[in-house]
Amino acid sequence: MKIRYKVRDPLGRSHEGQVEAVSQEDARQLLQRDGFEVMEIFDGKDDGELFPRRIKKSELIYAVNQLAIMIDTGVSLSLALHGLSEQEENLTLKKVLLDLKGRVEQGDDFSTALACHPKHFDRTFVSLIKASEQTGSLGAMLDRIANHMQNEQETQAKVRSAMAYPSVMLCLAIGVTIFLLTFIMPKFTPLFLRKGIALPKPTEWMMMTSEGLVHYWWVWLLVSSILIGGFMLGRRTDRGRKVLDWVKIHIPVFGPLYRKVTISRGIRTLATMLKSGVSVLDAIRLTAEVSGNYYYERVWTHVLREITQGSQICDALDGNPLFPHTLIQMISSGEETGKLDYVLGKVSSYYDREVETALKTTTSLIEPIMITGMGAVVGTIGMSIMLPIFSLSRGAG
């Protein structure tokens, strides 16, 4: 039968396609024989959904929590997965749970089964489960993973909430500006031209902009579409990602907040991995992968190289402008006392509070900036309309 797959070649590029094979396992072996890393593999059968629902982070967290409870109470992994699938309403997640159950019953390790669904279970998740299989603490590990995912989700929710206000204000400012230039300004333009008075420069500029928007709206729409499309495509390239990630950590007001969020994510991941028994090298490697920023990923990769050569984490981070000196000192203290996982846990909690403080500070700064900017734009358009009217009034008097 035809088996659909998603693989990564030796150069790190992703590919999707179909291959003729007797079973999914046979297809996996064929692809691995050709030098590909199998990311996801599934048969070509229709799952009954025209538009499959995506799996929300909250749904996945709930499922992991429930699985942890059932495992802790002595339910076998296969029965626990079956029970979860029976009560799951999201058909996409239900299908994933049933696939995990089938693989476990066929003799696969749980971590191996999870690795077949990288879209839903990242390498950090898989590595933590693999470590728990070696220590026999699957229930406790699932609970720890659920807490880790919950913290990640809460941080993301706080950031989205903080960004909601400026986003709404920006859309409102753009909408009001377009309305004034395309509906209000054209009402006054014939009057100004008919009277033949000398128009102020701001009025001339606004009239030209208004005329361009009204008569050449399709050009603006085309240019906007090209810019948005170029941005979406560019961010997927290595060069585009580097530029965007550099802007994120250096942009005024938002830059410090983004750096703290990125550091918090990395330290929390590293602490969770070390507490769970994952080796330092694997933990740092995975921390680099989940950092979410090219420049922080590069720093963690540098740390990995230095540790491989016998250095400590604090020495590898020393002098790096992306990490505060106080953070490096705390890591150094943890390494000296042999309690690095404990110290990193405390540091991650500290940075979670720092993120909350930074969010409040950023929000308090954004509000007056947005109001001032919107007032300046609307005020400029209003003055460009009122100045010629004043001139006409003086001429009439």
Image: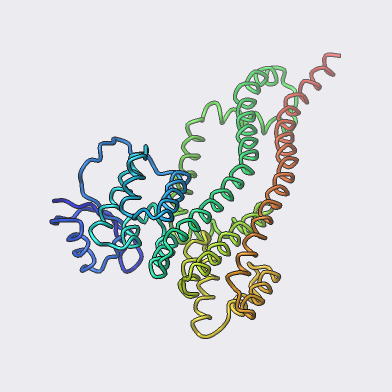
Q: Is residue 167 positioned above or below 386 on the image?
A: below
The percent coordinates of residue 112 (x first, y second) are 32, 62
Number of marks in the rendered image:
0
Q: As drawn, which residue projects farthest toward the top?
A: 396
Q: Residue at x 35, y 62 (%)?
A: 111
Q: Is residue 34 positioned above or below 310 on the image?
A: above
40 relative to 319 in the view: left or right: left
**Nearer to me, 342 or 174:** 342
368 relative to 73 in the view: left or right: right
What color scheme is it?
rainbow
The percent coordinates of residue 143 (x first, y second) are 48, 56
**Nearer to me, 182 or 67:** 67
The percent coordinates of residue 92 (x first, y second) are 34, 42
The percent coordinates of residue 214 (x first, y second) are 55, 26
Q: Is residue 229 positioned above or below 190 on the image?
A: below
Q: Residue at x 65, y 69 (%)?
A: 321
**Nearer to me, 372 or 88:** 88
Q: As drawn, which residue projects farthest toward the bottom?
A: 310
Q: As drawn, which residue projects farthest toward the front?
A: 74
Q: Residue at x 47, y 64 (%)?
A: 289
Q: Quadrant of the C terminus?
A: top right
**Nearer to me, 320 or 377:** 320
Picture quarter containing residue 251? Answer: bottom right
242 relative to 48 in the view: left or right: right
Q: Residue at x 36, y 56 (%)?
A: 118
Picture quarter containing residue 237? Answer: bottom left
